[in-house]
Image (tube, rainbow, N blue to C red):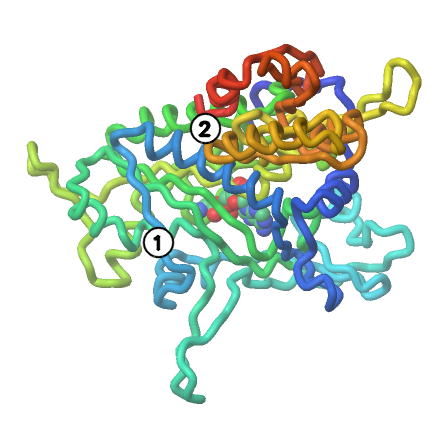
Amino acid sequence: MTQIENVAVTETPQVPIEKIVSLCKRRGFVYPNSEIYGGVAGIYDFGPLGVELRNNIKRYWWWSMVQLHDNVVGIEGAIITHPRVWEASGHVENFVDRLVECPKCKQRFRIDHLPPESLATNKCPNKDGGELSEPRNFNLLMETYLGVVEGERMQTYLRGEACQNIYLDYDNVQKSSRMQIPFGICQIGKAFRNEVTPRNFLFRQREFEQWDLQFFVHPSEMEKWFEYWKQFRFDWYKGIINQKDRLRFREHGSDELAHYAKQAFDIEYQTILGWQEWEGIHWRQDWDLSRHSEYSGKDLSYTDPLTKERYIPWIVETSGGVDRTFLNLLLDAYEEQPDPTGKDNDRTVLHLHPMLAPVKVAVLPLQKNKEELVTTAKGIHKTLQRLMVSQYDDIQNIGRRYRRQDEIGTPYCVTVDFQTLDDQTVTVRERDSMSQIRLPINELPMFLLERVSWK
Ligand code: GAP
């Protein structure tokens, strides 16, 4: 049975993915990987603004998950591990997509992505498609080799899910950090999947980044912690989006549970792609530590220091995607606003949360050819730059400069004008309301820090 909560369809129109792809390329957020060679499907590079936004998203996750929880610590594991890890984890056996192919249009489809009519008739969903082939299994793990001598090379895999390092390091972390159950380990890191149908820009890629919490508990406390983290993660996402009614939980039916999960909820977000998974909350029970104990021969059980009870800890997992967060935040933030006066002042705005925006403030001299304005503006920029990402811009008229900053989500623009030279005050313009206030220069750092820092 699939359970759906918090269903509400908002009236705000959905943003087409193409608008985001175009903005990302034009303004330096995301580029197709190896573009000059024709690109590689499902792999992307992040440009100057993209890397700032991505780092902010990751830092905020780390801050709220690790820094603010006394019972959570972090690690950074390697991408390559011993190949037995993936046998123990069940991925060699179970990490497969079932695919069918259309002999006419040559397109491949995951069976679980086919529309019901195609499933019923076995016909390709494309207009001129034909009869679909028999389903075949494809393993998603990406293979690689260690060593250089032919015949002695060891075949292994790029990690198919980042969380495996946490189970591998569990015992070392528990002992070296003197953590007692219940406690959690977090990690942000790359994962690799040979997705047969990578699509929708950053939504389904072959190389992507995940953030995971694995929270280790006594079996009797599993339910309590599962509920705690499920709600915590839901509220976390709610706090960084504008369209709050586009977020919901969906419980997995027994037929769609991953091989390791006894219960699972997706936090879903509604975009032009429909309701889609953003993060999974999984009741992994003792699957992972039991399997790694069995395959490695190392006992990963825990002894309670007070009761001396010995048991394999159960695990609550929260596992989300950095890239999917990046894409969902852009879809959530993007707005094209027509000029209410009908003049040529339409603007595109990214209503990104100020603490996540790639550039926090832009400092703009009213005129480029007035030396005193330029010198003062550059001085303010130099001061702010030490505290946050600041941009100095004196190209084109002030209206165009505001619009350039709106389009990349800069929450504040500081304008240095002739009054500044008299009274040492500047104009501060807020992105969403476009309202302006005057502020003494020496109050700027505190004013901005209060508005763009983690809360
Ligand atoms: N350790 C559990 C795990 O990996 P998952 O549902 O396969 O679970 C977790 O992945 C999250 O990783 C997803 O909710 C999604 O945000 C992200 N993700 C998964 N596959 C992805 C892909 N091909 N491209 C981008 N993000 C992906």
Query: Residue, x 82% and y 59% (percent of image)?
Result: 131
Mark 2 Cβ inside 8 Å of ligand 1:
no
Considering the image in quadrants, where does the N terminus appear? Answer: top right
Considering the image in quadrants, where does the C terminus appear? Answer: top left
Q: Badge 2: how crowded within 10 Å, few (<14), some, or many (20+)?
A: some
* Secondary structure at numbered mark 1: helix
Query: Residue, x 8% and y 36% (percent of image)?
Result: 305
* Secondary structure at numbered mark 2: helix
Q: Which of these two is toward me, 267 or 104?
A: 267
Mark sitting on residue 165? 1
Taking the image as shown, residue 140 lies to the left or right of residue 115, namely left
Horizontal and vertical percent for residue 390? 57, 34
Q: Are marks 1 and 2 in contact (CB under 8 Å)?
A: no
Residue 255 seen by the camera: no
Whether 1 is drawn above or below 102: the answer is above
Q: Which residue is mark 2?
A: 233
Taking the image as shown, residue 439 lies to the left or right of residue 303, namely right
Mark sitting on residue 55? none
Horizontal and vertical percent for residue 288? 33, 50
Q: Which amino acid type is marked by label 1? A: Asn
Residue 337 seen by the camera: yes
Label 1 vs 2, first from the N-terminus:
1
Horizontal and vertical percent for residue 127? 90, 51
Q: Which amino acid type is marked by label 2? A: Arg
How many dots with numbers?
2
Q: Which of these two is toward me, 47 or 178?
A: 47
